[in-house]
Each structure stands twice: as structure tokens, then as C-alpha cells.
Image: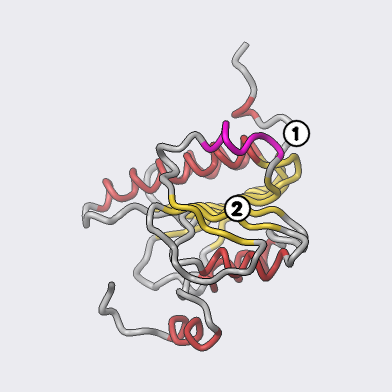
């Protein structure tokens, strides 16, 4: 656990009953893009410690559902229409398990364990982002939305171009709740295309 003192966002999260300050990143993204709607089915990748899952569960309401996945075991409380499973996004065959058209939103706050080597961390973040995007393209219904975290680096343009290929609209959001020193940002894809380029077979 970090010994970093809580800032405004950390204190706000504690006061409002969320597990982490990261909830306000999703809140900002959602307010800017209308990412999550009532009744939606949401897949939350990298869900621990549960703030994004809790936020999504509130937004979709009991007519929706939220499935979270993380390599760390979650022991907190969630409403009946939300749960967090233990599992590794990189090793599980989620595309086969979940199937097409099974979600309306895929959200990824996944990040690598940082090493202090900037270019290595950026490369690992890019790999996680692209895995999340691959899953999103496969399991989202046409018109569905995606958001993924990525560390800005030399592959950043490749990442947001891939989102642009698969969705009708692409946006880049740097929420105020991100730490000042962080080089994380979020790439949003709105309205998954019926036949994304990345799903089309080569001629």
C-alpha cells in the first residue's frame, strides 16, 4: 500500500464511499462523452479495487449489469447486478467465453507494475491497452463504447488510430483527477462500427 498522503481526490473518494480516487477519472470521462447509460452492460477490465465497477453499477442501475475482472482478488461489497471476478486479461480467452454483442461498454483502467524505466513502462501499457481494445471490439455490440488507459509514448498514435478505425468517434481525455506527474491518459471510442477494420479479414 502506498504511503503517499491523500490529496483532494483521495479525501473526496473516502468521504463518498469509493475505494479509490480513480472513480473521478471515470466520472469525468463519462460526463464528457456519455459513455455509460442506464441499463447498459459494462465490462470493467482491471477492476480492483472496485471504484470503476461501483460507479458503473450506479450509472447502469438494476436493469443493467457490470462484470469486473482483475488479477487481484476483490473482497468488497457490490450491488446484486455487479461482480468482480479473479482472472488475468492477458491469459484468459475472454473473447470466446463472453462472445459477441455481450456488452455495451468496455472500460479498462489497467496499468502495468511500473519499473521506473519510462520506455519499458510505456510499451507494457500499450500492450495492455491493445489487449483491452481487442476484447472490446470482439464483445461490444455495434454502437457500443470503449475507454482505455494508456501511458503516452511513441506508440500512442498507433493506439488512438486503432480506436479511430474501430469506432465512429475517438476522443482523448486527461481527467483532472489524474496525478499531475502522471503521463497516463484515456482514449475513448464511441459507437463501435458494425464492421471495424481490425475485425475484417485481409483480402
* Mark sitting earlier along the chain (1/2): 2
At x 46%, y 45%, the residue is 129
Which residues make up the magenta segment? 94-101
Question: Quadrant of the image for the N terminus?
Answer: bottom left
Q: Callout 1 environment at 10 Å: few (<14), some (14 to 19), or many (20+)?
A: some
* Horizontal relation, residue 118 to residue 190: left or right: left
Res. 194 mark:
1
Query: Residue 168 at what x, y percent from top left?
Result: 72, 43
Tell me the CA gap for discs 1 and 2.
17 Å
Mostly what secondary structure, the magenta segment?
helix
Residue 53 visible to an observer of this rendering: yes
Residue 65, picture quadrant: bottom right
Q: Check residue 98 for magenta coloring.
A: yes
Q: Residue at x 62, y 61 (%)?
A: 82
Disc 1 secondary structure class:
loop
- Where's residue 175, x and y in %? 53, 69
Mark nearer the viewer, 1 or 2: 1
x 75%, y 44%: residue:
143
Q: Residue furthest left?
A: 116
> Residue, x 47% and y 75% (percent of image)?
19
Whole-percent x and y of residue 98?
Answer: 61, 38
Q: Is residue 165 visible?
A: no
Q: Residues within 10 Å of mark 2 (few under 14, many from 20)?
A: many
Is disc 2 placed on a helix, strand or loop?
strand
Of residues 40 and 188, the one nearer the viewer is 40
50, 112: nearer the viewer: 50
Q: What residue is pinned by disc 2?
A: 188
Name the one closer to the observer, 146 or 118.
146
Q: Quadrant of the C terminus?
A: top right
Report the coloring of the rendering.
secondary structure
Amino acid at each position: 500500500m502506498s504511503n503517499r498522503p491523500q490529496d483532494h481526490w483521495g479525501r473526496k473518494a473516502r468521504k463518498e464511499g469509493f475505494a479509490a480516487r480513480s472513480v473521478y477519472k471515470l466520472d469525468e470521462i463519462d460526463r464528457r462523452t456519455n459513455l455509460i447509460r442506464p441499463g447498459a452492460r459494462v465490462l470493467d477490465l482491471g477492476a480492483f479495487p472496485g471504484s470503476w465497477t461501483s460507479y458503473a453499477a450506479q450509472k447502469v442501475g438494476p436493469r443493467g449489469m457490470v462484470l469486473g475482472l482483475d488479477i487481484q482478488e476483490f473482497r468488497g461489497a457490490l450491488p446484486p447486478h455487479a461482480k468482480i471476478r479473479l482472472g488475468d486479461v492477458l491469459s484468459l480467452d475472454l473473447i470466446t467465453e463472453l462472445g459477441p454483442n455481450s456488452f455495451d461498454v468496455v472500460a479498462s483502467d489497467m496499468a502495468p507494475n511500473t519499473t521506473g524505466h519510462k520506455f519499458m513502462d510505456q510499451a507494457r501499457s500499450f500492450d495492455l491497452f491493445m489487449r483491452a481494445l481487442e476484447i472490446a471490439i470482439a464483445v461490444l455490440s455495434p454502437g457500443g463504447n470503449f475507454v482505455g488507459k494508456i501511458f503516452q509514448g511513441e506508440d500512442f498514435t498507433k493506439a488512438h488510430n486503432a480506436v479511430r478505425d474501430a469506432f465512429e468517434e475517438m476522443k482523448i481525455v486527461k481527467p483532472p483527477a489524474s496525478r499531475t506527474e502522471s503521463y497516463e491518459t484515456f482514449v475513448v471510442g464511441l459507437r463501435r462500427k458494425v464492421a471495424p477494420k481490425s475485425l475484417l479479414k485481409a483480402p
